[in-house]
Image: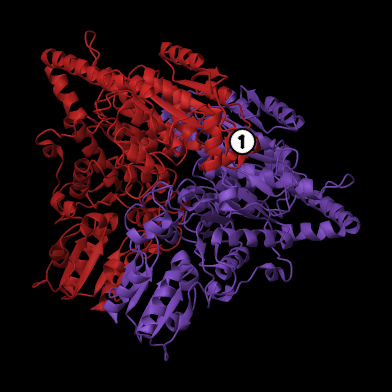
Chain colours: A red, B purple
Amino acid sequence: MGCAPMGHILYDEIMRYNPKNPYWFNRDRFVLSAGHGCMLQYALLHLAGYDSVQEDDLKNFRQWQSRTPGHPENFETPGVEVTTGPLGQGIANAVGLALAEKHLAARFNKPDNEIVDHYTYAILGDGCQMEGVANEACSLAGHWGLGKLIAFYDDNHISIDGDTEIAFTENVEERFKGLGWHVIWVKNGNTGYDEIRAAIKEAKAVKDKPTLIKVTTTIGYGSPNKANSYSVHGSALGAKEVDATRKNLVWPHEPFHVPEDVKGHWSRLVQQGAALEAEWNAKFAEYEKKYKDEAAELKLIITAELPAGWEKALPTYTPESPADATRNLSQQNLNALVKVLPGFFGGSADLASSNMTLLKMYGNFQKDTPEERNLRFGVREHGMGAICNGIAHHSPGLIPYCATFFVFTDYMRAAIRMSALSQAGVIYVMTHDSIGLGEDGPTHQPIEHLASLRAMPNVFMLRPADGNETAGAYKVAILNRNTPSIIALSRQKLTQLPGTSIKGVEKGGYIISDNSSGNNPDIILIGTGSELEIAAKAADELRKAGKAVRVVSLVSWELFDNQSDAYKESVLPSGVSARVSIEAGSTFGWEKIVGSKGKAIGIDRFGASAPAGRLYKEFGLTPEAVVAAAKELC
Amino acid sequence: MGCAPMGHILYDEIMRYNPKNPYWFNRDRFVLSAGHGCMLQYALLHLAGYDSVQEDDLKNFRQWQSRTPGHPENFETPGVEVTTGPLGQGIANAVGLALAEKHLAARFNKPDNEIVDHYTYAILGDGCQMEGVANEACSLAGHWGLGKLIAFYDDNHISIDGDTEIAFTENVEERFKGLGWHVIWVKNGNTGYDEIRAAIKEAKAVKDKPTLIKVTTTIGYGSPNKANSYSVHGSALGAKEVDATRKNLVWPHEPFHVPEDVKGHWSRLVQQGAALEAEWNAKFAEYEKKYKDEAAELKLIITAELPAGWEKALPTYTPESPADATRNLSQQNLNALVKVLPGFFGGSADLASSNMTLLKMYGNFQKDTPEERNLRFGVREHGMGAICNGIAHHSPGLIPYCATFFVFTDYMRAAIRMSALSQAGVIYVMTHDSIGLGEDGPTHQPIEHLASLRAMPNVFMLRPADGNETAGAYKVAILNRNTPSIIALSRQKLTQLPGTSIKGVEKGGYIISDNSSGNNPDIILIGTGSELEIAAKAADELRKAGKAVRVVSLVSWELFDNQSDAYKESVLPSGVSARVSIEAGSTFGWEKIVGSKGKAIGIDRFGASAPAGRLYKEFGLTPEAVVAAAKELC
């Protein structure tokens, strides 16, 4: 209720959008980072004429299968740009949206035709301000000079636990100035409409810095007894107080009833939105005539279409190709893909030279070089993930990737989950994916991370074993625009294995070698990533000893789960219970694959600081260990 | 090398510690938040006379089982206070250490005897500064006025990817002023010894604010060719450059050789440290005479000893006790435990009234009321976890707890992992542990979190079903001081079940009801937390239909794993493959429990916004579903 004036001014006067086409490319973007206030956004979408929020939807607030869930979900409600609720995510998404606009504008705008040109608005509260992810993203927004990002800070001094005095007494304005933002203070946010309008005007005039408009409001404004109290933060007012509020605000109308004069006032926006889009379409037609190639590229970004034959860019390898770390093979893919995919770009959280994520043809995306494609996130993993979610949600054809060490998925897990939930096809390039990183020790060595991400819905957790599998992982990642992919990559060199393939990766699990017949091997050895070659070596030994051995690469459990029962049976026949798996990570979850009679070789403790070879030996991740386990089973 | 002057001054002149007893209670604490520079700390510990770092240890840097791992690990190297390496954690731990000092000083110091009195020092780099967790913790340090926290910001302008100009151009001093810190700038950190000394003096004089001393240094200072370059960030100089550096610094001595005059200079610190501790011991003896009760309490905090009979404080329940949410039952435990455990305190990330974590006998720990025991973390989950790690590592008898919604373990996962790795017995009170929270929807509903935390080494993931189990979970959590416990609690009311017990919880898994004989039931139903009562209801139905049914509560998989094979067989006999589990979360990992012939009922998609009852029905988490699954198996 305290945010109503800001929201009203934005939707009624300021923002350029088309209610009948919520996906119009050049629309202004709005993010309600303080997602618990979503009823405000639903009400505004309703008033503005979006089909997604009808009167019945408002009445079904927070009910099963309604389009008005308890927090704004982009996949439920057209008009909602991103999914918010977990605090701090939304403002970081907004940074990504503004980055995308700045990047595309720099690449595609012409002196005579500024085809990309919109603002990104956000409302954030005290909770968002306290979250570290917000500070990370806002530090980058200042660094990048995202002048078309305008954030309203709803300064109501109330969070769930009461007055913010109990935990939040920092000087937010000073912090934001330090972060390189322009800061404006509107002291009377409850009724100061003109001040809000003036602040927006001032913000737009500052082109080289994002703007924070601190708007001091009263939570639950209008409620005579509950305004300015934490009791309205996440709870309804209650029937009695609703009555009192109606009286106080002189609002005699029925619940959910929009009076005719209000309807009349807002009704112009449908027509206005259609006109805005039509005008832009005409502009685009002009653009297309004059700048054919650029228009074709931009179209691919606006739609989710991939250019024909793009997958031919993926590198392939033979067993004779030199052994290499999959992080290096990953870089070959990144640099191949950027040549064919106009919406492909990204970067690392200060580990570009370790993650091997630099796009060699391009410079750094910076304040004055926003047309470039290497993003430099600094040591800000969480902000990085949330910014990439914003980029992905800006346009269906934008394909952001981001990178850090695999263990630091822990820092950005909340953002990864938002990718998965909000269906953002972000590519997470996660190198140094096991104890194989060696000397940096247990703080840097992932153990439980594969299991923990396999358990997350709507994520592809991929762990390629060599060059062909790395290319396969990228193929899966590019094709799946509504599912994030996490690609776990090795620091250490790996052999190019016979039998691996892009096609195999697309199935999630497949046979790389087999000397059995009739789908009935003596034993099945299963590996992922850097341990697949250990399984292959063990198979060689066992075959020498006369065993019929199948080796299976289980590069993505989720993709394998998606295959037909017949296919799965052809890879892991239910009649064969002699199974040994090897993976340099927690064995948690592997019982599903190896069954109760099989053996899962892994690491169920933290790692240690030592050279990688020594660690593999000490932790028992060796062909000898696989052979020994296999011999006990067959 | 750029930090050497700060480190040298701290260890040689400023800090009060006893090298021969690294655990002396009243020592100054030092945290190297920029953990990759750990060789500096090892060298200083060696020079200062700590037994943990001998010449051979320095030579075995980053080798298997050495006491000098690639990042500082408190559990490997006495003298290292906390485990650092993942950036930002260390400075947040330092906030926790300083908080603990301020709290204990306020509780125990007397006008005539300030028995608790030390400083906390930290060195952090640009990387730490960029991390959100650092901003969260530093915002709290400013809010709490932790005047005895002095942090050195090694401003060397270099991170792994190169000059910080590429991603970090914010004004750190301005941000820290905004956060309520006192800020000092030492412009010549490479050689400005006197300036550093003066800055520390100034910092100590400012008693109501923490101090950031920004020290501008040159990374790799002394190296003629590699100084001021990112190539020295995480890599060795190389033999040739080491030679050049030796020449440049006029250091003719053998590698690892400490010249006699240097040895002589440092040797006084062993004697000085012993004297400091002896002096303090005498002071404590005085204190004990005069303030017997306080001294007894403080002793419990200094040691890890628990007061005799403490566990009698745990509440117990009968099936007749009223149904209640486990979050409320948790609050009964918290308020019971705080009466008997002097080192027990904590709080929530702005959800105290939802997490039910307020200690009713106490006020808020604040700048001017630091003797109180309710911590108010604001919406800063990650900072909260890392601060609690610092508190736990301050003194073995400090038992911090912290709270948020279970889904937001994602925000603080890196801190939880540091609890586990560094053996900090933090208690994570995680409420709203399933779709049972209802209307807030999928952003707030944990799905994969139980699985993802069960996969993490050295964590007890506990999900109690009712009052007795909640008390049992707290008993486990309190007893295990080197393992963090995560207690998942319901928002919704749960029945007090017959058969549950504290003793049962201590085993991790146990039988709550059984109408079979000979350890051979027709079916075993397994549940955790809020779904245990669904399993119990299903058992009633099945028994009515003549089945012999066992119901098992699997409240903690890790504790159950720790039991003897005989005990495990007595609960889950290998001969009984008819098993059905029910848990409102991912089924990932449950194959281990139910076997390939059993059935795991759970949720392998994201949740939804609707009333809880409706969600349980829609997601098939009902007694009917359990009965149907059971009937297919027996």
Say which of A583 and A321 sits in front.
Answer: A583
Label 1, residues with CA under 10 Å away: few <14, some 14-19, many ≥20: few
Say which of B406 and B318 sits in front.
Answer: B318
Relative side of A440 to B294, left or right: left
Relative side of A197 to B631, left or right: right
Residue B247 makes an appearance in the image: no
Q: Amino acid at mark 1?
A: Asn
Q: Residue at x 89, y 55 (%)?
A: B286
- The percent position of residue B77, horizontal first and vertical second, equals 59, 54
Instruction: Check disc 1 and report the residue beneath it.
Output: A225
To which chain does the residue with label 1 belong? A
Tell me the quarter of the picture where residue A499 sits.
Answer: bottom left
Instruction: Report how many numbered discs are placed on residues in the image.
Output: 1
Tell me the quadrant of the picture where the C terminus of chain A can be found: bottom left
Task: Decide: is A152 above or below A632.
Answer: above
- The percent position of residue A150, horizontal first and vertical second, equals 43, 21
Task: Decide: is B436 above or below A85.
Answer: below
Q: Residue at x 14, y 37 (%)?
A: A313
Q: Residue furthest top?
A: A112
Say which of A340 and B337 sits in front.
Answer: B337
Relative side of A271 to B468, left or right: left
- The percent position of residue A545, horizontal first and vertical second, equals 18, 75
Task: Decide: is A53 above or below A106.
Answer: below
Task: Decide: is A257 above or below A192.
Answer: below
Say which of B231 and B537 sits in front.
Answer: B537
- The percent position of residue B246, horizontal first and vertical second, equals 53, 33
Q: Secondary structure at mark 1?
A: loop
Residue A230 makes an appearance in the image: yes
